[in-house]
Amino acid sequence: MAIERTFSIIKPDATRRNLTGQINTKLEAAGLRIVAQRRIRMSREQAEAFYGVHRERPFFGSLCSFMTSGPVVVQVLEGENAVARNREVMGATNPANAAAGTIRKEFAESIEANSVHGSDSAENAQIEIAFFFAGCDVVG
Ligand code: ATP
Ligand code: MG
């Protein structure tokens, strides 16, 4: 298994409830190292560009409104099989289907306000990391 990097977002529903530390604890306990982290307020333009693949989905407008409704924490996570490991610790998109102990099972409010984002492939991770971080911001 290779050391890999993935991109993560702690979403506005979680920052609003002051859950950044509890979510980071779960990421670290899963063997993921937070090698870059910044708290930002996403612009509508950034949210629409970031979620561009979902542009045609019925929830696109609502998702972009939600993602700009409060601060988010953007992160780069590093570890063995980081993309898959992070997806595991996140749990299913819909918290009703998420396994016990996952971030979404414990913290998510709904299928939309589901507390975290994680890249779904190594290729998308590279694109998403470059969207928010310069190379010099990531310290492994
Ligand atoms: P993410 O991309 O945020 O890591 P994911 O890969 O599990 O989550 P996607 O299918 O990529 O889920 O959807 C992106 C995001 O869009 C979801 O995390 C959620 O916030 C929102 N979303 C997905 N499906 C729905 C839906 N049916 N209704 C409302 N919002 C949704
Ligand atoms: Mg996704």
Image: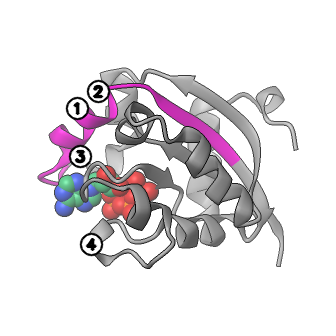
Query: Which residue is label 2 attached to?
Result: 69
Q: Relative to 63, is 42 above or below?
A: above
Label 4 with label 1: CB-CB less than 8 Å: no
Residue under the point 64% across and 62% down: 122
User: Is the N terminus in the top left, top right, bottom left or bottom right quadrant?
Assistant: bottom right
Query: Which residue is label 3 attached to?
Result: 55
Residue 66, given in percent of the width and then of the height, sits at 26, 36
Q: Could you say whether the residue bearing mark 2 is in a helix, strand or loop?
A: loop
Judged from this view, the residue extending furthest toward the left is 58
Circle 1 packing at 10 Å, graded few (<14), some (14-19), many (20+), is: some
Magenta segment boundaries in residue numbering: 56-76
Q: Amino acid at mark 2?
A: Ser
Label 1 with label 2: CB-CB less than 8 Å: yes
Query: Which residue is label 1 attached to?
Result: 65
Q: Amino acid at mark 4?
A: Ala
Residue 85, given in percent of the width and then of the height, sits at 65, 70
**Does the magenta run of residues contain 70?**
yes
Q: Amino acid at mark 3?
A: Arg
Circle 4 packing at 10 Å, graded few (<14), some (14-19), many (20+), is: some
Circle 3 packing at 10 Å, graded few (<14), some (14-19), many (20+), is: some
Q: Nearer the viewer, residue 82 or 17?
A: 17
- Work out whether mark 4 precedes mark 3 in sequence or the reverse, and give the earlier one: 3
Query: Which residue is label 4 attached to?
Result: 96
Ligand 1 contact, mark 4 (Cβ < 8 Å): no
Q: CA distance from mark 4 to mark 2?
A: 23 Å
- Work out whether mark 4 precedes mark 2 in sequence or the reverse, and give the earlier one: 2
